[in-house]
Image (cartoon, rainbow, N blue to C red):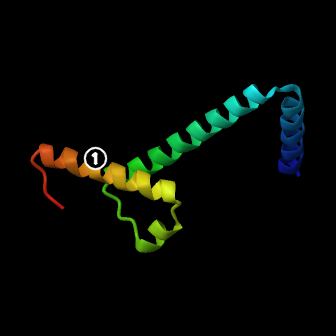
Amino acid sequence: MERQVLWVQSIRFFRSWLIASNDEQIMEAIHNYNERAETLEKSLIQLSVMSEGKVSLTEVYNMTFTQREMYIKLFNEYNDMKNKKGGFNI
């Protein structure tokens, strides 16, 4: 029940903020939310890559296009970093 009340309060707050905001403020908020979401996704993928975690084909298919792009980029950076330190080639 508490969760429902909190959700309703959040919706009311967001609605009142939305009504009081101009287009520029709304677009800035959306941009900030997108940046925060991207940072979170990158951090999770980086954690998996740097810990040498294995990602199954099913997990890759469940990733969004953006997540796969980030994973590949970070995996390549990780390999470059390991190779420069005298690591192994994959």
Name the residue furthest front.
Answer: 23
Residue 27 % position (x, y) = 70, 33
Residue 50 % position (x, y) = 32, 49
Residue 16 % position (x, y) = 90, 32
User: What residue is at 48 percent from the left and 55 percent from the top?
Assistant: 67
Q: Specify whether 59 is left or right of 34.
A: left
Name the residue furthest left.
Answer: 86
Q: Is residue 47 above or below residue 25?
A: below
Q: In which image quadrant can residue 15 be found? A: top right
Q: Specify whether 21 is left or right of 38.
A: right
Name the residue furthest bottom.
Answer: 58
Q: Is residue 57 above or below residue 68?
A: below
User: What residue is at 62 percent from the left and 33 percent from the top?
Assistant: 32
Write down the residue under mark 1.
77
Residue 44 % position (x, y) = 47, 49
Label 1 is placed on what type of residue? Glu
User: What residue is at 88 percent from the left and 39 percent from the top?
Assistant: 9
Q: Is residue 62 above or below residue 48?
A: below
Q: Specify whether 71 is left or right of 39.
A: left
Quadrant of the drawing holding the C terminus? bottom left
Q: In which image quadrant can residue 57 be found? A: bottom left
User: What residue is at 49 percent from the left and 70 percent from the top?
Assistant: 61
Figure disc tally:
1
Q: Nearer the viewer, residue 76 or 12?
A: 76
Label 1 sits on a secondary structure element that is helix
Q: Specify whether 25 is left or right of 11.
A: left
Alpha-carbon neighbours of circle 1 within 10 Å: few (<14), some, or many (≥20)? few
Q: Nearer the viewer, residue 44 or 60?
A: 60
